[in-house]
Amino acid sequence: MKKYVIRGGKPLEGEVRISGGKNAAVAIIPATLLVNGVCIVENVPAVNDVILLTKIMSELGAKVSFLDKTTLRVDATEIHTCSAVSELVRKMRASYYLIGVLLGRFGKACVGLPGGCDFGVRPIDYHIRGFEALGSTVTIEHGIVNAVAENGLKGASMSLDFPSVGATINIMMAAVLAEGTTIIENAGKEPHIVDIANFLNAMGAEIRGAGTDTIKIKGVKELHGGRYEIIPDQIEAGTYMVMAAAVGGRIKVSNVIPKHLESISAKLEEIGVTVEEDDDFIVVSREPGTVMNKVNVKTLPYPGFPTDMQPQMSTLLCLAKGTSIVTEGIYEHRFRYVDELRRMGAKMDVDGRVCVITGIEKFSGASVCACDLRAGVSLVIAGLCADGMTEITNVHLIERGYEDIIEKLKGLGASIGVVDDEENLSQQVSGTTAG
């Protein structure tokens, strides 16, 4: 079994370059199915979810190839089906975007229900209501979503009960080729929503208001091919910022958009960490041994503190002096990783969506298991801080969203490696294998 092995206690120093946004990429790649032509998508992160998507796209009949490690070419002019029900679809959450794009292109879609990280019920009710408002009939049978618009999709006005990111993107993509104008009220405002709107506009769509509460989509007859560069990954950047704070040292986090990171930067400064911003990079530093302050955190839709940074920030707060309270405002059951941090010495008490964290002096190395993407990387953070050795299993979940995490951390001076079986693990523990 593949594991990460970490020897903790080494300060992190140097520069880490942030990859393209995973959450943007997993929507922009399906969106190319709406385009009558060739799309060249740049700054694509080399993560497992992207690889899965390219395989699904190929199954649908799209011609998909990497021109280099981060540049993807997609030609969907000869896509031959509106059905995506393979096991690959069930392995990732973002596969639900195939419903919106296939419905938008063909007026019908047959897509398996999505999978992805398990941290509570995440229904697609808001997506379905949006598709129905556009004139489609949606049923779910035997784990498959069937959406049909017999008379074609028609523009409509709708208001989301909650500013769901996924529903905002899915409805927006379905509406770009619909007849008439669609208005989405109480829309999500996250940076990757704006990025997807910008991509679609670059291909000929007419979308206004992305990044605000109200998005207006004027339907067009077709989209044309073109070239587009994905924005940097907000959550990857925030993760390395938290690593610098937790482990101590000084990290320059480059290729970022500082405005997207304001809520994270503000909390780090409140904790007592130094954060310096420039046009496209942020420097985070903390002298090892410096006392960090307790803070309270509540996750909220953008521009609030992101739910995808909650496990990382909670891990950092385990090392702050005093008692911190973290409230999860988006998803239920997102504290499942707490039991694993307790193995490493964390003092955390969970009651529903609230976690009370009492600061400890340090983590202790242990064998732990990642339960989802962001929870998994929180264990990496704890391992980097810990006394002794930490072994993390289920690391394929971490690699769903973090490109070259091992090499990037080694470049910052971390003692971390990958082992694939028990024999290699024995060598790693004895110190005969490079970390």
Image (cartoon, grey):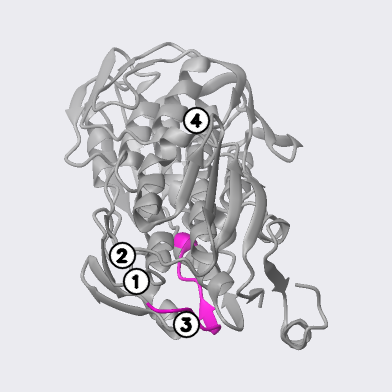
Q: Which residues are magenta?
A: 360-374
Image-quadrant location for residue 402:
bottom right
Query: How much space separates mark 1 and mark 3, taking CA atoms?
Result: 17 Å
| Pointers 1 and 2 in contact (C-beta within 8 Å) | yes
Would you place residue 140 above or below residue 281 in this image?
below
Query: Which mark lies nearer to you, 1 or 3?
Result: 1
N-term mark: 1 or 3? 1
Residue annotated with mark 3: 344
Vertical comparison of 97 with 135: above or below: below
Which residue bears the numbered disc 4?
A: 31
Callout 4: 10 Å neighbours few (<14), some, many (20+)?
many
Earlier in the chain: of badge 2 and badge 4, it is 4
3D distance between C-alphas at marks 2 and 4: 42 Å
Foreground of the two, 128 or 375: 375
How much space separates mark 1 and mark 4, taking CA atoms?
A: 46 Å
Q: Quadrant of residue 12?
A: bottom right
| Residue 309 in the figure: left or right of residue 289 | left
Nearest to viewer (mark 4 / mark 3): 3
Residue 146 percent across, percent down from the top left: 35, 43
Residue 160 located left or right of residue 24: left
Q: Earlier in the sequence, mark 4 or mark 3?
A: 4
Neighbour tally class for label 1: few under 14, some 14-19, many 20 plus, Cα within 10 Å = some
Q: Tell whether 412 sits left or right of 82.
A: right
C-alpha separation, residue under disc 1 versus residue under disc 2 = 6 Å
**Residue, disc 2:** 294
